[in-house]
Image: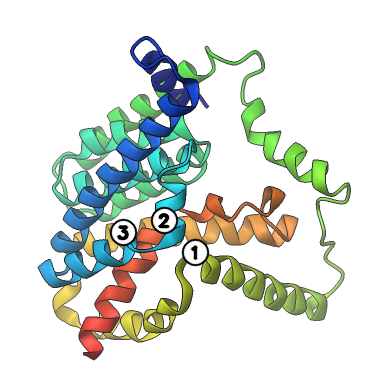
Amino acid sequence: MWFYYFISAALLYVIKDAFFATKLVTIFFGTASVYIIYAVAKKLFDKKVAILSIFLLTINPEFTIISSTPLREPVYTFFIFLSILCAINNRIFTGAFSVGMAFLTRIEGLLIGMPYYITALLMQRINKKMSKIAVILIMFISFILFMNLWISRPFSYIINTIKNQEIGNSYCVKFTYTGPVELIIRIKDIFFIYFKYLFTLIGPNLIFLIPGLFLLFRNKENKNEGLKIYILCFIFHLVFWGIYLFIFERLAFNYHRYLYPLMPFFIILVSYGFLRLY
């Protein structure tokens, strides 16, 4: 995808070191993400949850490592959380632009970001809803057409992940449906594989997720539109990677960094669950 490499290359006019230039981009967006995540958590819950969330993120070794390595995930995560913040604040066109930038960074912006954002707008109470959604659809189409100016075969980036899986495993599609029993076993196995990846990223803090979710849905005071947008985006990411693992059984090259955008979603809910229990 185009954006991360473009700004990294632009930095080479100032910084004559390709590795440091790409690393600097990741560090900048990883650091900026901390502020955006703080703003989202504070908007959804309160200052205590926001402070605990960014504390847990900044001491998390996986978050720190991935946020300081030349990778695109921190850039994508920044734009996705910026879109959530904009949508919560009813700045829907700025949020749509942010989703478009997430797409120019990683393909998940097309497969997760754009569908989540349209669904979130359909759920919100806004004036001239359908007219604004039509404008945002035009914005998204424009981003997609722009992206296709930079590649030789339109939409080839969607199938590249299959090629990546085939490099490490010639039988990349692991499962053929043969009956309900096999399907149930498959779902169980994928659940534990998914949990293993998440545990690598977040660790035993995950134990506060279930009480956090339980107390969150039980607390009627938190049933606001902002929280619905946040949960919706979270679910879209969870389901997407769940389907991906169901098909391929593992992440490409076992790189759990692809699940990096899920870390802030989980950490905010973990922080809420811990403080509510406390």
Q: Is residue 154 above or below residue 160?
A: above
Tag 3–tag 2 contact (CB < 8 Å)? yes
Residue nearest the viewer, comparing 220 with 30: 30
Per the image, label 3 sits on a secondary structure element best described as helix
Percent x, y of residue 193 = 66, 70
Q: Is residue 145 above or below residue 228?
A: above
Residue at mark 1: 201
- On the image, which quarter does residue 165 sit in? top right
Q: Is residue 6 above or below residue 128?
A: above
Name the residue type under label 3. Thr
Residue at mark 2: 63
Left or right, 129 with respect to 263, comes to left
Q: Residue at x 85, y 62 (%)?
A: 176
Percent x, y of residue 210 = 40, 83
Residue nearest the viewer, comparing 83 with 19: 19
- Please report whichever mark, 3 or 2, sits nearer to the chain's N-terminal start: 3
Q: CA distance from mark 1 to mark 2?
A: 8 Å
Percent x, y of residue 103 = 44, 33
Name the residue type under label 1. Leu
For discs 1 and 3, the disc positioned in front in the rendered view: 3
- Please report whichever mark, 1 or 3, sits nearer to the chain's N-terminal start: 3
Left or right, 261 with respect to 185, comes to left
The 10 Å Cα crowd at callout 1, few under 14, some 14 to 19, many 20 or more, is many
Residue at mark 3: 58
Per the image, label 2 sits on a secondary structure element best described as helix
Q: Residue at x 43, y 33 (%)?
A: 23
The 10 Å Cα crowd at callout 3, few under 14, some 14 to 19, many 20 or more, is some
